[in-house]
Image (tube, grey):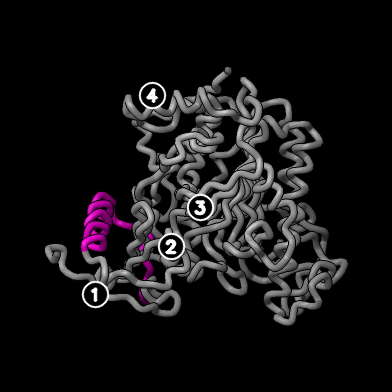
Amino acid sequence: MYIHRFFLHGRRFSVQRFSSLFIAILLCCCAGSARATSPNVIIFFVDDLGYGDVGYQGGDMPTPHIDSIANNGVQFTDGYVTCPVCAPSRAGLLTGRYQQRFGFGDNPGPYQREKSAHIGIPPTEPILSDRLQALGYTTGLFGKTHDGIAEEQMAFSRWDEFFGFNNGASNYLADLNRPHNPIFRNRTPLQKSQSRQNTPRTELIDNGVIPSGASDYLTDSIGDAAVRFIDANKQKPFLCYVPFNAIHGPFQAPQRLVQRFHDEPNQKRRLVKAMLHALDQNVGKILKCVRNHRLQEQTLIIFLSDNGGHDHSPNTPLRGQKGTMWEGGIRVPFCMQWQGVIPAASIYHFPVSSLDILPTAVAAAGAAVPPKWNLDGVNLLPYLCKKTIAKERPHNELYWSLGTRMAIRDLDYKLATDDGKMYRLFDLATDNGEKTNLIESKPAVANRLREKLDIWKDTLPPNNAGWNPAIGPKRTDFGTPQPYHQLPPASSP
């Protein structure tokens, strides 16, 4: 049996673990075999999509193209991102490291910060495009970057091709964005005639509905740019990173799409459904391009959201939303497809993280992930073969931090705090809706997790992204306060 080299990279194994893994791989039956050359990598990293928004997880509207990735590959029931808000979550995915390790602990906008704060991914911190360019990949980014506010932190110089914007949000008509938030192609801000049809700036969006005959819709433009990139690079390995800004606000959708959901009584939810439909259609457009070039077995495809759903996006059955340390803020729709390698219609229940995407992609390309990279993510591919190491988890612990809000998942227990003083504890194996607080009944577990969380926190440098209290809110003011309990002192039994 041919064993692809990606199975042997991406994690620091003990001899015993390596031996057991090697034997398991020999015995497992993958659905076919991977090609010897490096696969293409496509990553859909969408914005503010709720856990319960997608069809394959019981959403109230069809998302057939997104669902096809899960159906043709693996659905992660416990798929996490590294932060419940946009920019830090993106930094974690792109680096494979907790973004707090390089001071990127909060969003760089929308509120003005101290001028001395360098908020973003440092130029010295390698990202996924750097890693794959070194392996001969052509790389393209199409959509929202939100990687930093300083010019040297923006994405332009780190990708071979770029189309999108750098702020946290964008109007879905580019004509409404300039000059403060232009659409870029590589380093060049596009003029109106280059980015959209020549529609006057006076064009109105009526309660989020874009009139018929108006400018092209930004979600469509991002999808088209990704398709052109794949068409141009189909003969060589490519990384196509597509961070759609949908379904992040402002809630805007073409009239033709809004009319499809006229039976939805809630106006904002009607707009969100129209935006999600456009998102799904553009995911389908890109997947069709892959099929047209017969690249299905040569392409690793990953889909996930940057955080949980916010306004009018359900996170059912999870509790909480974007910006919170509840599961609804950090657990997201997450699926992965590689036909011929990852068995179709798989469901994986152990926790995985967006941190794992970089080492998984590098290992898929056939390269080693050296310890000196100091990654927090792991190569997931060895875990996704049928009946392989069923009791082995990619992660025993995962950590989160946003301002004073922190959380840890240790196996199936989760401890969270808003202020470092009041805590709550849940057993996610039996209570993924976080309804039963175990803080009083399991103080020993709570103290053990708190000590781990404190140790992790002590390894981190200062956060560069501190909010300016004179201008914007503190993170402790984000969202509705939820009931916590005082954790007993660490020395308590």
Q: Earlier in the sequence, mark 3 or mark 1?
A: 3
| Residue type for callout 4 | Ser
Q: Earlier in the sequence, mark 4 or mark 1?
A: 4
Looking at the image, residue 309 sits to the left or right of residue 67; the answer is left
| Residue type for callout 1 | Gln
Residue 455 shows in this picture = yes
Q: CA distance from mark 4 to mark 3?
A: 27 Å
The residue at which mark 4 appears reads as 19
Circle 1: element type: strand
The residue at which mark 2 appears reads as 430
The residue at which mark 3 appears reads as 79
Q: CA distance from mark 3 to mark 1?
A: 29 Å
The residue at which mark 1 appears reads as 486
Q: Earlier in the sequence, mark 4 or mark 3?
A: 4
Q: CA distance from mark 2 to mark 3?
A: 17 Å
Classify residue 256 by image quadrant: bottom right
* The label number, if any, that marks residue 312 in the structure image: none
- The outermost residue toward the top is 1
Q: CA distance from mark 1 to mark 2?
A: 23 Å
Classify residue 378 by image quadrant: top left
Q: Is residue 448 magenta?
A: yes
Circle 2: element type: loop
**Which residue is rendered at x = 62% and y = 20% of the image?**
36
Q: Is residue 274 above or below residue 94?
A: below
Quarter of the image with the C terminus in it: bottom left
**Which residue is rendered at x = 71% and y = 65% of the image?**
275
Q: Is residue 173 magenta?
A: no
Mark 2 burial class by Cα count in 10 Å: few <14, some 14-19, many 20+: few
Magenta stretch, residue numbers: 444-472
Residue 112 shows in this picture = no
| Residue type for callout 3 | Gly
